[in-house]
Image: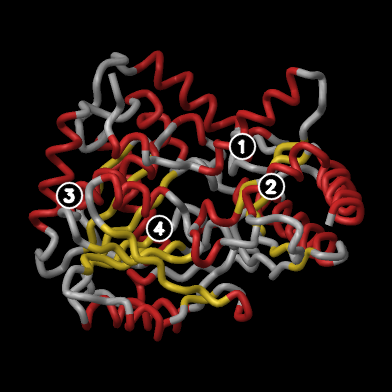
């Protein structure tokens, strides 16, 4: 029997190179893993009051299914959070809870894209958007972000790539994989383009509380009349990747998203519900102490600065400075390797350092780069960059 063509075409470079990395580890070789955005694999720990809330929730709830659209207590807490952070007024019925933001993306794309439809995605950008678009028969169209301007979106390029088949514009801010953070003016320009062309604006804000200057702008604040879906969750900023809790907020003042929202709701019912005890615990955690956000930001800012300086000191490597999240997206300069996948594999085999090829975030705008996380402590990052420097000296 053969698998379907659509399933075999799925690619996720972030985990793909873990297979050869495990082979090295089975041979007794230590591999420094800088490939995946999971803070809990390093020296970040879920806050105690959040863990205690889960233990309490398991004892107090019936451990059955939750409502398909999400536990009411959590949805109310999300409404309050969005009102406080983004100054937007939405109702509980505008909020859904999903098994991570990935599920929200999948359901939204499934409800929006017909075969041949187009989705504008940032290049480089998180691969889930183009992969799901292709999976459902659509065409992901990458718009340019400008490396020379700290990976800011090229507004003119976006305008050129809009066609009658374009359904939506995706904005990831802070950006994965570049760590770029967009100012209010840029976001207003993007929202204006969406409004001008009757596009849904999808605002991915999963790293919103991880900007190093503490400032995050949401287009929902800047463009109140544009139909928009805000995607967010708790994996990153609340150090809960294993809980698999995300959410989507439909901000739709003119009822333009009614059909898409219903399409998502039907999928929610089909898959029953997201994790019930975790939703109960998260509704409590959102109202509890939030000082861990500043502690995380301080650590990440220090490590981003260290990674930026060390990488730029390595001959053959250059990078822009990230402004948020925990990713950096360096460029390598050498004709030794035919592509960035070959480069990353050699880095793994000879430097014993696991990173992700830039083309995994878009062939056109990611090629010739690689992504790594600066989540580990400074000593571990130092060892990693020492190994990379030795590799570039000996092999490039």
Query: Which of the two residues, 266 or 145, is positioned nearer the viewer here?
Result: 145
The tag earlier along the polypeptide, 2 or 4, is: 4
For label 4, the residue is: 204
The tag earlier along the polypeptide, 3 or 4, is: 3
For label 2, the residue is: 344
Residue for point 20% across, 52% down: 94
The quadrant in which the N terminus is found is top left
The tag earlier along the polypeptide, 1 or 3, is: 1
Residue 264, quarter of the rendered image:
top left
Circles 2 and 3, Cβ within 8 Å, touching? The answer is no
In this view, the mark in front (2 or 3): 2
Element type where label 2 sits in the image: helix
Residue for point 81% across, 66% down: 312
In this view, the mark in front (1 or 3): 1
Q: Disc 2 versus disc 4: distance between alpha carbons?
A: 28 Å
Q: State how many labels appear.
A: 4
Q: Which mark is residue 106?
A: none
10 Å neighbourhood of mark 3: few (<14), some, or many (≥20)? some
Q: Position of residue 75 (x, y in %)?
A: 28, 43
Element type where label 1 sits in the image: loop
In this view, the mark in front (3 or 4): 3
10 Å neighbourhood of mark 2: few (<14), some, or many (≥20)? many
10 Å neighbourhood of mark 1: few (<14), some, or many (≥20)? some
The tag earlier along the polypeptide, 1 or 2, is: 1
The quadrant in which the C terminus is found is bottom right
Q: Which mark is residue 111?
A: 3
The tag earlier along the polypeptide, 1 or 4, is: 1
């Amino acid at each position: 029997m053969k698998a379907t063509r659509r399933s075999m075409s799925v690619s996720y470079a972030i985990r793909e190179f873990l297979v050869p990395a495990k082979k090295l580890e089975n041979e007794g070789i230590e591999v420094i893993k800088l490939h995946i955005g999971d803070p809990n694999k390093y020296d970040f720990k879920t806050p105690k009051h959040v863990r205690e809330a889960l233990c309490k929730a398991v004892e107090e709830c019936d451990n059955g299914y939750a409502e398909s659209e999400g536990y009411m207590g959590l949805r109310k807490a999300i409404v309050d959070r969005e009102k406080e952070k983004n100054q937007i007024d939405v109702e509980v019925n505008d909020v859904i809870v999903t098994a991570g933001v990935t599920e929200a993306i999948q359901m939204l794309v499934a409800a929006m894209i017909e075969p041949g439809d187009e989705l504008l995605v940032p290049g480089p950008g998180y691969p889930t958007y183009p992969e799901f678009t292709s999976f459902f028969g659509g065409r992901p169209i990458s718009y340019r972000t400008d490396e020379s301007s700290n990976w800011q979106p090229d507004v003119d390029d976006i305008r050129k790539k809009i066609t009658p088949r374009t359904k939506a514009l995706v904005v990831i801010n802070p950006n994965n994989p570049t760590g770029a953070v967009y100012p209010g003016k840029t976001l207003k320009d993007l929202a204006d383009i969406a409004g001008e062309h009757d596009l849904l604006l999808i605002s991915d804000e999963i790293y919103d509380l991880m900007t190093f200057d503490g400032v995050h702008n949401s287009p929902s604040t800047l463009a109140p009349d544009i139909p928009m879906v805000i995607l967010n969750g708790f994996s990153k900023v609340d150090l809960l990747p294993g809980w698999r809790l995300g959410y989507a907020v439909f901000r739709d003042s003119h009822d333009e998203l009614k059909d898409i929202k219903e399409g998502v709701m039907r999928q929610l019912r089909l898959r029953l519900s997201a994790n019930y005890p975790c939703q109960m615990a998260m509704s409590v955690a959102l109202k509890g102490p939030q000082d861990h956000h500043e502690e995380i930001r301080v650590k990440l800012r220090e490590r981003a600065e260290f990674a930026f300086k060390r990488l730029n000191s390595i001959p053959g490597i250059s990078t822009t400075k990230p402004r948020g999240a925990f990713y950096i997206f360096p460029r390598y300069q050498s004709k030794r390797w035919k592509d960035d996948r070959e480069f990353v594999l050699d880095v793994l085999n000879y430097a014993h350092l696991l990173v992700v090829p830039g083309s995994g975030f878009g062939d056109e705008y990611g090629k010739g780069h690689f992504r790594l996380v600066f989540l580990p402590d400074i000593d571990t990052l130092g060892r990693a960059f020492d190994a990379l420097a030795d590799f570039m000296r000996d092999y490039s």
